[in-house]
Image: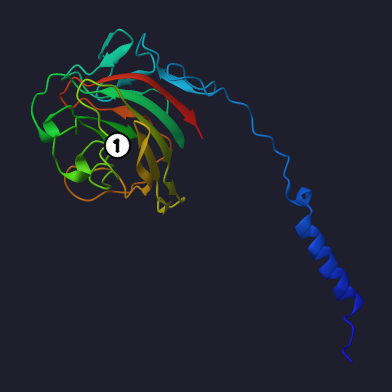
Amino acid sequence: MKKALPIIILLAIANFLNAQTNPKDTEVWEPEPRVVDPGTSANPPSDAIVLFNGNDLEEWELVYGKGEAKWEIEGNIMTVVPGNGDIKTKRKFGDIQLHLEWRTPVEIEGEGQGRGNSGVFLQMRYEVQILDSYQNRTYSNGQAGAIYKQHIPLVNACKAPGEWQTYDIIFISPRFNKDGIRVSPGRLTVLQNGILIQNYSEIKGTVEFIGQPKNIAHGNDSIKLQDHGNPVSFRNIWVREL
């Protein structure tokens, strides 16, 4: 004859089975996510910081030297004026969601890196390349959507020259300890024209034209747009702090 299980074990089994069959036990009601109006293609989300509204460059300044940004504004669009220099946001950011729309010139001049070249730099250091990569071969880790010289985009999602394109970027900043040592890398997720081209890619350090990435401790910093000598245009730039 088999011995009966002790009553305490039976109760434990009953409680376990009951816990697994009651859906309310795994419902979480607090905290309740705050409501954000997602906006439309022409209007940013309700909690976004608008960095370019089509009217002025109040949120921007020159990177090198002192003074106001001097890129051209016409028809709610700002365009690089070659030779006027890179511009950066006056505000500094950490982890963000960034939206911007960009367009390379209709008239094709040059090839490779010389065609519609610009870039968006997170915290002034980590570049997502902007380039006319429509039927324009260059090194893969330098084409549009690359984390420059670090990560090749998953696909080439570029539209033809003169067409508006979008970047939606999720940026997670690297972390450094009190001794200035990086304890976790930065990460970038990028959608170009609604297509995933960087999937939580690890940032190796600063982007470098020559040499290897560097990891020098820093905090929040500006977003930079590059004057690479081509009249690339931008519109509808906004950011959400995460």
Which amino acid type is marked by label 1? Val
Q: Given the current orientation, which residue lies at the most extreme bottom position?
A: 1
* Residue count near mark 1 (Cα–Cα under 10 Å), binned few <14, some 14–19, many ≥20: many
Q: Nearer the viewer, residue 90 or 50?
A: 50
Relative to the observer, which residue lies in front, 15 or 189? 15
Q: Is 101 in front, or is 51?
A: 101
Q: Is residue 149 above or below residue 235?
A: below
Q: How has the structure been colored for display? A: rainbow
Residue at 89%, 87% (x, y): give it. Answer: 3
Q: Residue furthest right?
A: 7
* Left or right: residue 15 compared with residue 234: right
Q: Where is residue 197? Give x, y as percent.
A: 33, 41
Determine the image quadrant of residue 63. Answer: top left
Instruction: Give the quadrant of residue 87.
Output: top left
- The residue located at (37%, 30%) in the rendering is 222
Give me the residue at 26% from left, 43% from top. Answer: 207
- Count the marks: how many? 1
SS at mark 1?
strand
Which quadrant of the figure contains the N terminus?
A: bottom right
- x and y percent of residue 53 in the render? 40, 13
Give x and y (percent) for residue 76: 33, 10
Q: Position of residue 119 (x, y in %)?
A: 26, 31
**Mark 1 — residue?**
128
Residue 123 seen in this snapshot: no
Do we see residue 194 in this rendering? yes
Q: Relative to residue 195, is residue 35 depicted above or below? A: above
Q: Residue furthest front?
A: 1
In which image quadrant can residue 142 be found? Answer: top left
Question: Would residue 81 appear left or right of 155 to someone viewing this image?
Answer: left
* Image point (15%, 24%), residue name: 229
